[in-house]
Image (cartoon, rainbow, N blue to C red):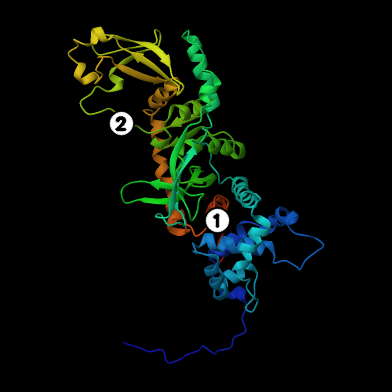
Amino acid sequence: MLSKNTQINRNQIEMIALEQLVPANHLVRKIEAAIDFSFIYPLVQDMYSSERGRPSIDPVVLIKMAFIQYTFGIRSMRKTIEEIETNLAYRWFLGFGFYDKVPHFSTFGKNYERRFKDTDLFEQIFYRILKEASDRKLISSEHVFIDSTHVKANANKHKFEKKGVRKETKAYESRLREEINKDREDHGKKPIPPEKFDKEETKEIKESTTDPESGYYVKDERTKQFAYSFHTAADRNGFVLGTIVTPGNIHDSVIFEPLLEKVIEKQGKPDAVAADAGYKTPAIAQFIFENEITPALPYTRPRTKDGFMKKHEYVYDEYYDCYICPQGQILKYSTTTKDGKRQYFSNPHQCQNCPLLSQCTQSKEHKKLIERHVWEHYLEEADHLRQTRENKSIYAKRKETIERVFADAKEKHGMRWTTLRGLKKLSMQAMLTFAAMNLKKMACWTWKSPEMA
């Protein structure tokens, strides 16, 4: 039967408390029960004057407003304030009554510029929430999963200038230099002088005129944009353990070491680290093994031209330090380059009449070259471990941990793109987004529903 609502009770007057209007299982109740936000006061104490100026807006209210924005995926602080004005649950969470005035949307931005901008406040908040989760035995960091995702910058991809910049320094360069010169001395070669290592190398990049700190990122023909990279580590329960923000044109492998070092500093050394093919480099494998951690890295196909023999078809003899080709010829050591690659050459007089020459090399001199990184044995050991049942199980968890973190961050917490500009503000967004996700997970896992009357 069709019925119509004939009672319009818009002007009905009730005597009711705000507490009664917030659902018993609302997320804000779970968050409020999960953590005491008063820990923020000591963190911001030195940012406020104790003697001068007008009374400030409660800093806990400011931070809670930011948490509302990032927890519920609201696209801006202006829109967040609009939601707080009409949403009773948000008012309850901030401690406001029905008629309390909500701060202007520019208040958080002004406080950021005047007080929070050059501080590590948001990082401290992130690690404080992580500590709360750890104290409650919710963190399981024996297996760490590392990856990065791109966040579209607030910049027009057609407005840029081409600029020559120096190539970024790798975290492992000093270690690699020592290894290269030691390897050369072991082979009776002179060490490479420091000035040859320090020779400045430049590259041409596209620099946005809108947001110069972003980086031009190319994924395929359709995806070309200015972006930031959020390099992130997560545990097996999906809690974010650490994050570093860089321009979108910085390769994943460059940030791996500082990110893992940060995780080790804050959470202790994990038993294993899982990462995708972008992190499968000799330097990363060496760093993981030297820290007595097990790598869980994927299979990567050989990058050999079609019709040519693969590198694994040439057998490396570790004792005599040489390669042996399928026809039994020895490729002898020649030198170690400043890139850390040992070079092995065949004898062209033996190669010129070889029946496999056309499948072996295109060299006009009939000389086959094979390069082997000084740390390649670490990569080979990682490949051997890849076959174990434990490593297969660890690597399979990536889709349920770090990939799930990024999916949730983009779909539910507004991290697909940003309205902010500059590395410092994007670092703030990353810390607040992942802190909100950790807090939400901790709140839901520790929540005890009120008993029914």
* Furthest residue toward right: 51
Left/right placement of residue 232 relative to residue 347 reads right
Q: Is residue 95 visible?
A: yes
Q: Amino acid at mark 1?
A: Ala
Q: Which residue is mark 1?
A: 436
Q: Residue 215 location, x and y as percent?
A: 46, 47
Badge 2 marks a residue whose secondary structure is: loop
Q: Can residue 292 be seen from the camera position used here?
A: no
Counting labels gives 2
Compare residues 143 and 349 and report the one nearer the observer: 349
Q: Quadrant of residue 344?
A: top left
- Residue 59 occupies quadrant: bottom right
- Of 172 and 317, nearer the camera is 172
Does dot 1 land on a helix, a strand or a loop? helix
Instruction: Choose the circle earlier in sequence order: 1 or 2.
Output: 2
CA gap between label 1 and label 2 equals 38 Å
Residue in the foreground of this view, choosing between 65 and 88: 65
Q: Which residue is mark 2?
A: 301
Examine the rendered structure and indicate whether residue 71 appears above or below residue 324.
below
Query: Within 10 angstroms of label 2, few (less than 14), some, or many (20 or more) residues?
Result: few
Q: Amino acid at mark 2?
A: Arg
Quadrant of res 62: bottom right
Image: 443 above or below 190: below
